[in-house]
Image (spheres, rainbow, N blue to C red):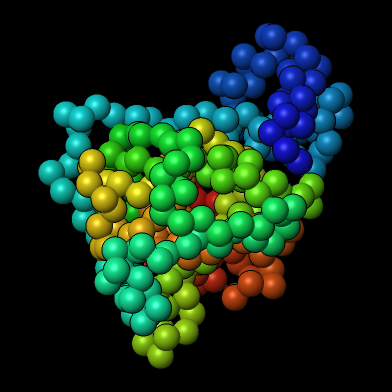
């Protein structure tokens, strides 16, 4: 489903509900599990995609001002991938780095850092919340994930965007970190692949050369050291099948803040 299809679906839904209904829904996202919702859904929307999904996720995460910035943005999890291929790329300033984007797309592509920097970008000051009990406010600049998707042309069967990372989570070099998000989060205005933190090139400890910012979700969703992006119709065949390294260990797949 592409963006304009989604917009059509949204406007059909809003038309079916009427303006008053739309305002009411916008303030009541938590009601999606009550009984009357499925009946309204039948009016204009396939039950497979809930109203909660459509409306809650359009909302923007809070953005802050430069005065709110944390004095420093700490690192968590991997600070330096234990991976010789990554080490070589890093040693040469990522001049030979290429982001692979493939899977359920019409035009698989590889992007150098120069090509990524030439695509539409966004800068945002946001708060990062880690489940381990710390938060930090940072300024991120990066390429909009929607721009990359527009370039590779997702197929209708693409339902998730999977981020494959450079860092193995086991000492023997296995179990690379990975994460996944759905297409709504993938096209969200604040979903970017950041290459700058606080006006500096993204430090290695924070995921160089690019890391995901998916601002409505918790820290572990924000994949660092992205090497490959794969569009899939299901993440069940990947690793432990739960859509991410920490999800495979029991964390929630949708880590809404
Ligand atoms: N590739 C990779 N991405 C990762 C992690 C990791 O260990 N490896 N840790 C996650 C967790 S739990 C958090 S809180 C953030 C930390 O980002 P930071 O290092 O920029 O603070 O990255 C997330 N993304
Ligand atoms: Mo985290």
x and y, in percent, of residue 123 in the image: 36, 34
Q: In which quarter of the image is the N terminus?
A: top right
Q: Where, by quadrant of the figure, is residue 204 drawn?
A: bottom left
Residue at image location 33% in from the left, 60% down from the top: 208
x and y, in percent, of residue 177 in the image: 46, 70
Residue that lies at the very extreme toward the left in this rendered image: 71
Q: In this view, does 39 lie to the left or right of 178?
A: right
Residue at image location 40% in from the left, 78% down from the top: 85
Q: Quadrant of the C terminus?
A: top left
Residue that lies at the very extreme toward the right in this rendered image: 42
Residue at image location 63% in from the left, 41% down from the top: 150
Q: Taking the image as drawn, is residue 133 in sight?
A: no
Q: Foreground residue, 58 or 155? A: 155
x and y, in percent, of residue 169 in the image: 41, 78
Q: Where, by quadrant of the figure, is residue 37 drawn?
A: top right
x and y, in percent, of residue 55 in the image: 62, 29
């Amino acid at each position: 489903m592409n963006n304009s299809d989604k917009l059509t679906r949204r406007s059909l839904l809003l038309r079916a509900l009427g303006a008053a209904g739309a305002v009411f829904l916008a303030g009541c996202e938590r009601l999606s599990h009550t009984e009357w919702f499925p009946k309204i859904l039948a009016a204009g929307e396939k039950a497979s995609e809930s109203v909660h999904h459509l409306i809650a996720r359009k909302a923007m995460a809070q953005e802050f001002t430069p005065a709110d910035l944390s004095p420093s943005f700490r690192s968590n999890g991997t600070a330096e991938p234990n991976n010789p291929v990554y080490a070589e790329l890093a040693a040469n300033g990522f001049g030979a780095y290429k982001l692979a984007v493939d899977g359920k797309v019409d035009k698989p592509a590889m992007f150098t850092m120069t090509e990524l920097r030439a695509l539409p970008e966004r800068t945002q000051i946001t708060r990062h919340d880690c489940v381990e009990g710390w938060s930090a406010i940072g300024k991120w600049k990066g390429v909009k994930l929607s721009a990359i998707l527009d370039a590779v042309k997702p197929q209708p069967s693409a339902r998730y965007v999977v981020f494959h990372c450079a860092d193995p989570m086991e000492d023997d070099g296995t179990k690379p970190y990975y994460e996944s998000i759905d297409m709504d989060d993938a096209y969200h205005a604040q979903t970017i692949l950041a290459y700058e933190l606080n006006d500096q090139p993204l430090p290695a400890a924070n995921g160089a050369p690019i890391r995901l910012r998916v601002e409505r979700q918790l820290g572990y969703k924000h994949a660092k050291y992205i090497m490959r992006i794969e569009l899939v119709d299901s993440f069940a065949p990947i690793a432990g099948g739960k859509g991410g390294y920490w999800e495979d260990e029991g964390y929630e797949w949708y880590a809404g803040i």
